[in-house]
Image: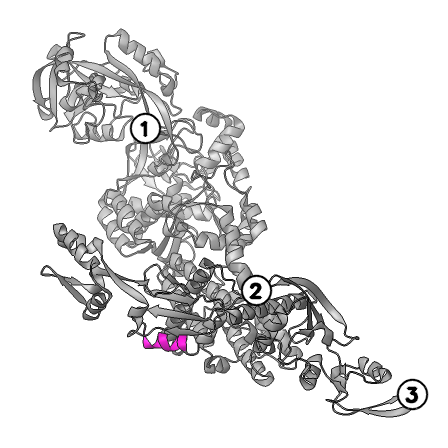
């Protein structure tokens, strides 16, 4: 279901900007009803855009059956949640110092306060506080918030720090500060180049050293008198201690303004400077302006009052030092104005009372990645404080507490029915403009009325209540909720660790004693390409809709799923990365699909209907068929395992690798076979059908498997692939049928189950070896600048401890593919007995392990290992250990081995895998036979290009002719007849002089072969006549297709009957004539 967060600061801030509202009183003057009506009018403004974008991205979300946090049903369930907590004694009212936005007149959560830090310059001052028992001695404190000094109630020291009483020789005044912080008063001490210890005698004299705990209790003269004469003032203006005080900045003495600092409030409460629940000196209103209590700056915003207050402090002789500090400071994420910390009266949930249970419940959940749960979230939970859930705002769910003025009679409402029962008023909306008008008669004091408290819920409380409120629990859907709780799975961003994840866990623990979810995937943040947050103002990211339109939703989905984002890491969004998915995954995948369809159509044109057969797939004996089937089943098994473990970040790379294996290896290795061009006619078609059966099987499986990840391209593939199924078009395909073909959509199908019997590690291992051999062979070719069209004599592979299966595979059924891919005449694997003639085995220490084990002996051991010969290294590996200076070293874990090519001879060139486990050596000899074979391959390629430009089908037969000034091409053809007869079904290019005069040229071109210009042409098949045959008879033959003739041909020339004999008077092709007449000696 789609869910919409409708309440909270983002909406109010936009309305405040629209209506130019800068103060809370303006809303009250306007009327909460009008204000909230304006808020309500904009919350659904973007729902259609969201629906369009979400649907375009292929997310399965029900927008018709959505829920909104402003719906009465949702809000009533939120009331129920709170009332349950209230009944359990988990709700109380108190003060909390919180990040506070003066522009929005509301406190923010710590999570929100961390969203927008900026580098700023603030005034930094040191002020003096003379001791009452000795006015000549002043304690000095440092602060970067001078506006908090009028609210100073205490000074805090660290109980274990050393403090010194010093005489400042420049001013002749006596100060107390931390010994380790003298540099704050005398900055030159921070300059290591200029500062000399003897210079201290010119600056100050230490009179006494005191421990912080010995300063506790001393009273001082307040900086201002604004709170000096209140009933509570006897507890004020004294030194207290706490270990939160640090000596990395300031004077080691922290001024305490409990209304404007979280630690200040905590420490002052602990030392009874202030009392829990009592009024707190807080001379700043909800919009950040000083109240009339602070007459010199009344009506002035706190951040603008600094200079005025500093001036007053200086005039009073209490300013010791003034400077500026450049530092990082939190700003309101919505209004982009500096935050302050401010004590606000709040309603709290006693999280600390059941914190241990929350921690235990977290252990029952499964997170990906796990370290976010075990470290970041666990640490947050173990230090969880009571949760302030109220906000002094208007557009939100009202806190359902009705009370008298002195809070001696309090009722917490849990439902609309309960409110109607107690008040006699039934409401159908629970927003402030409605429920604030409802009063409840007092039971304790007849005649008095209870009114609702002013606050609304923090929208994070609504988010945490979502599992219950979205179903209007417990008022409706009770059984449905209880059957589906906890949720199987949720996913959100890393920034929700202290947000939604936390509120879900706290409320579910408080209500039901268990977590709200079983599994959780933590997403990272998608940043702009420059690493900054995406910003509409900065325009530092491409429009997502344009990206989707340009590359498709599937490409964007796969780019994101195959990125660090699914591992809770940040992603710098790069548009070329989305294009890369299209080019590297989708286009090859589509080409494999299209190749399959084209060849099925080719087969069906010849009368063979394609019907999927699992039996044919399973019974194939082709090595690459067995491999790709095994790889497919292995992928299916892997996806099931990893998806069950919610490890999305391992699934997508495996899927991407598989598509590469399918398209770059299986289809390419079997291209001619799948076209029906391998072997004799009947056998070729049989092999083609087997290959197509396998290709169909893997395409269908991977289409269904990829459906959840790339929903659009897989639906396209499926709609074409399903038509081959016997069940296609039978029955209702919309009732989630289990079988492909019958199902109307790939998304109605369950992921395929893997077939254990088709898993084949041997086949996969052998194919991996083939790929490594081919890749290294290509590298060697490139190094010697040998074109792939030019054959090479032989390729040798030297593998470290290959299994019998690998050796048999690459020298047996896979050998022909290696020869074809590398265009080699021979391939062999060097035996273990002969490998010393080809390579040298070297060993190196695994420093990560041996470094700790050997210590100072490491150099000697390394020297001994490097000096080993090939035979010694082989012996060490076979024995599994090495003993050097009485130290036994494990060969498998503590040594690394590597092959290096060492065979002599300039004709050899070799390549090695990075780990040195495989060396591929190529005989690069280029003799006349090799060069001719290369030219033959070039001619084949040119013929194929002409066929393609003539739009010929695979089965279309042509005759091929060439014309040259030299005999380079003729020699190449003569020496490589098999190359042509295998490729062109017995066809061989002939010199142009053997082409009949009536031959029809389909395409021709002049090309460069071996440095010679050669005219190559392809022609329609035609009948060739005997040299000297009657012109009229020859003319009749020129009008006939070769397929029209068989054996003797009777015709009439000028009224005279004539019998033309096949093999004497005519031939069905120029090649047949050339062979029969021995016109060329190489045929």
Q: Nearer the viewer, residue 185 or 821?
A: 821
Query: Badge 1 is on which residue?
Result: 341
Tell me what residue is drawn at x 64 percent, y 65 percent: 945
- Describe the element under mark 2 as helix, strand or loop: helix
Q: Give the residue furthest to the front.
A: 966
Q: Nearer the viewer, residue 630 or 639?
A: 630
Real-space Cα distance between discs 1 and 2?
61 Å
* Label 2 environment density (alpha carbons within 10 Å; few <14, some 14–19, many ≥20): few
Q: Is residue 737 above or below residue 501?
A: below
Q: Which mark is residue 591?
A: 2
Asked if disc 3 and disc 2 are in contact, CB closer than 8 Å, the reply is no
Does the magenta run of residues contain 163? no
Q: If you read the primary sequence from the N terminus, does the residue marked by circle 1 or circle 3 appear first?
A: 1
Can residue 611 be seen here? The reply is yes
Closer to the observer: label 1 or label 2?
2
Q: Residues within 10 Å of mark 1 (few under 14, many from 20)?
A: some
The quarter of the picture where residue 769 lies is bottom left
Q: Secondary structure at mark 3?
A: loop
Task: Give the mark nearest the N terminus, 3 or 2.
Answer: 2
Q: Is residue 405 left or right of residue 475?
A: left
**Is the Cβ of the residue at disc 1 closer than 8 Å to that at disc 2?**
no
Front-most of residues 411 and 197? 197
Q: Position of residue 508 (x, y in %)?
A: 32, 51
Task: Give the residues in magenta.
Answer: 803-811
Q: Is residue 86 left or right of residue 217?
A: right
Which residue is denoted by mark 3 in the rendering? Answer: 1054
Q: Is residue 85 left or right of residue 67?
A: left
Residue 984 x, y percent position in the rendering? 62, 76
Nearer-N-terminus badge (1/2): 1
Q: Nearer the viewer, mark 1 or mark 3?
A: 3
Callout 1: helix, strand or loop?
strand
């Amino acid at each position: 279901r789609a869910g919409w967060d409708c309440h909270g600061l983002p909406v109010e801030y936009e309305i405040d900007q629209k209506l130019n509202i800068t103060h809370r009183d303006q809303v009250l003057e306007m009327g909460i009803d009008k204000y909230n009506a304006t808020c309500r009018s904009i919350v659904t403004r973007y729902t259609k855009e969201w629906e369009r974008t979400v649907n375009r991205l292929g997310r399965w979300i029900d927008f018709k059956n959505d829920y909104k946090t402003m719906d009465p049903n949702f809000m009533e369930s939120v009331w129920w949640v709170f009332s349950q907590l209230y009944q359990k004694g988990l709700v109380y009212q108190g003060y909390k110092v919180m990040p506070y936005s003066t522009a929005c007149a509301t406190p923010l959560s710590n999570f929100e306060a961390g969203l927008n830090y900026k580098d700023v310059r603030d005034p930094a001052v040191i002020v003096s506080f003379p001791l009452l028992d000795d006015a000549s001695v002043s304690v000095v404190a440092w602060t970067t918030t001078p506006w908090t000094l009028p609210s100073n109630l205490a000074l805090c020291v660290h109980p274990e720090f050393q403090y010194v009483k010093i005489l400042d020789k420049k001013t002749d005044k006596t100060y107390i500060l931390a010994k380790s912080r003298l540099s704050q008063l005398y900055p030159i001490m921070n300059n290591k180049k200029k500062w000399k210890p003897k210079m201290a005698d010119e600056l100050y004299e230490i009179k006494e050293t005191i421990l912080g705990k010995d300063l506790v209790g001393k009273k001082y003269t307040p900086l201002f008198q604004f709170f000096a004469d209140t009933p509570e003032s006897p507890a004020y203006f004294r030194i207290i201690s706490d270990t939160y005080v640090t000596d990395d900045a300031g004077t080691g003495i922290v001024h305490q303004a409990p209304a404007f600092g979280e630690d200040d409030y905590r420490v002052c409460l602990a030392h009874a400077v202030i009392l829990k629940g009592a009024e707190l000196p807080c001379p700043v209103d909800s919009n950040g302006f000083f109240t009339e209590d602070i007459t010199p700056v009344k009506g002035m915003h706190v951040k603008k009052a600094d200079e005025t207050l500093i001036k007053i402090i200086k005039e009073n002789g209490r300013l010791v030092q003034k400077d500026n500090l450049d530092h990082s400071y939190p700003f309101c994420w919505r209004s982009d104005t500096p935050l302050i910390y401010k004590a606000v009266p709040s309603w709290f949930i006693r999280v600390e009372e059941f914190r241990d249970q929350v921690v235990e419940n977290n252990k029952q959940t499964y997170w990906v990645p796990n370290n976010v749960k075990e470290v970041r979230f666990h640490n947050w939970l173990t230090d969880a404080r009571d949760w302030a859930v109220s906000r002094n705002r208007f557009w939100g769910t009202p806190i359902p507490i009705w009370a008298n003025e002195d809070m001696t009679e309090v009722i917490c409402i849990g439902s609309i029915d309960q409110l109607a029962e107690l008040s006699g008023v039934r409401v159908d909306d629970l927003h402030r403009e409605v429920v604030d008008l409802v009063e409840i008669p007092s039971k304790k004091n007849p005649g008095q009325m209870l009114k609702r408290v002013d606050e609304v819920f923090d929208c994070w409380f609504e988010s945490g209540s979502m599992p219950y409120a979205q179903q209007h629990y417990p008022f409706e859907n009770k059984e449905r909720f209880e059957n589906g709780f906890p949720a199987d799975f949720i996913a959100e961003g890393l920034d929700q660790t202290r947000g939604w994840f936390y509120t879900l866990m706290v409320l579910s623990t408080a209500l039901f004693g268990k977590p709200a979810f079983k599994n959780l995937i933590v997403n990272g943040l998608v940043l702009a390409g420059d690493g900054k947050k995406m910003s509409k103002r900065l325009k530092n990211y491409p429009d997502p809709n344009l990206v989707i339109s340009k590359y498709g939703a599937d490409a964007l989905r796969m780019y994101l799923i195959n990125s660090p984002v699914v591992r809770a890491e940040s992603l710098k969004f790069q548009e070329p990365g989305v294009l890369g998915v299209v080019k590297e995954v989708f286009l090859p995948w589509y080409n494999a699909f299209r190749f399959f369809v084209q060849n099925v159509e080719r087969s069906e044109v010849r009368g063979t209907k394609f019907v999927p057969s699992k039996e044919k797939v399973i019974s194939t004996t082709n090595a690459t068929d067995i491999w790709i089937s095994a790889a497919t089943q292995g992928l299916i098994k892997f996806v099931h395992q990893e998806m069950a473990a919610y490890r999305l970040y391992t699934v997508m790379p495996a899927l991407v690798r598989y598509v590469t294996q399918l398209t770059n290896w299986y289809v390419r290795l079997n291209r001619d076979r799948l076209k029906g061009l391998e072997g004799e006619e009947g056998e070729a078609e049989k092999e083609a059908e087997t290959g197509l059966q396998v290709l169909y099987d893997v395409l269908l499986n991977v289409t269904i498997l990829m459906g959840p990840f790339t929903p659009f391209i897989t639906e396209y593939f499926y709609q074409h692939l399903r038509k081959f199924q016997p069940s296609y078009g039978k029955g209702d395909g919309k009732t989630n049928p289990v079988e492909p073909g019958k199902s109307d959509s790939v998304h109605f199908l369950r992921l395929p189950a893997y077939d254990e019997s088709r898993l084949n590690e041997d086949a996969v291992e052998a194919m991996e070896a083939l790929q490594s051999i081919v890749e290294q062979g290509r590298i060697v070719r490139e190094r010697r600048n040998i074109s792939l069209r030019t054959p090479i004599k032989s390729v040798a592979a030297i593998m470290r401890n290959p299994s019998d299966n690998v050796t048999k595979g690459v020298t047996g059924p896979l050998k022909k593919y290696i020869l074809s891919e590398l265009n080699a005449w021979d391939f062999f694997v060097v035996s273990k007995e002969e490998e010393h003639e080809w390579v040298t085995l070297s060993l190196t220490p695994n420093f990560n392990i041996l470094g700790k084990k050997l210590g100072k002996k490491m150099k000697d051991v390394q020297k001994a290992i490097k000096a080993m010969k090939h035979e010694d290294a082989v012996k060490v590996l076979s024995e599994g250990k090495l003993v050097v200076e009485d130290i036994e070293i494990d060969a498998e874990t503590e040594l690394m081995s590597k092959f290096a090519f060492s065979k002599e001879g300039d004709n050899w060139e070799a390549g090695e895998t990075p780990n040195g486990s495989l060396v591929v050596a190529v005989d690069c000899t280029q003799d006349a036979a090799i060069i001719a074979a290369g030219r033959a391959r070039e001619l084949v390629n040119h013929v194929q290009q002409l066929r393609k430009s003539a739009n010929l089908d695979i089965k279309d037969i042509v005759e091929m002719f060439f014309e040259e000034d030299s005999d380079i091409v003729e020699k190449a053809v003569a020496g490589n007849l098999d190359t042509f007869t295998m490729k062109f079904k017995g066809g061989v290019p002939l010199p142009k002089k053997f082409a009949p005069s009536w031959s029809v040229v389909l395409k021709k071109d002049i090309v460069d072969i071996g440095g010679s210009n050669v005219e190559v042409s392809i022609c329609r098949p035609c009948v060739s006549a005997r040299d000297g045959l009657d012109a009229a008879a020859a003319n009749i033959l020129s009008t006939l297709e070769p397929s029209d003739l068989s054996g003797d041909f009777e015709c009439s020339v000028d009224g005279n009957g004539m019998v033309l004999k096949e093999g004497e008077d005519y031939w069905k092709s120029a090649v047949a004539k050339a062979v029969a007449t021995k016109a060329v000696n190489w045929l």
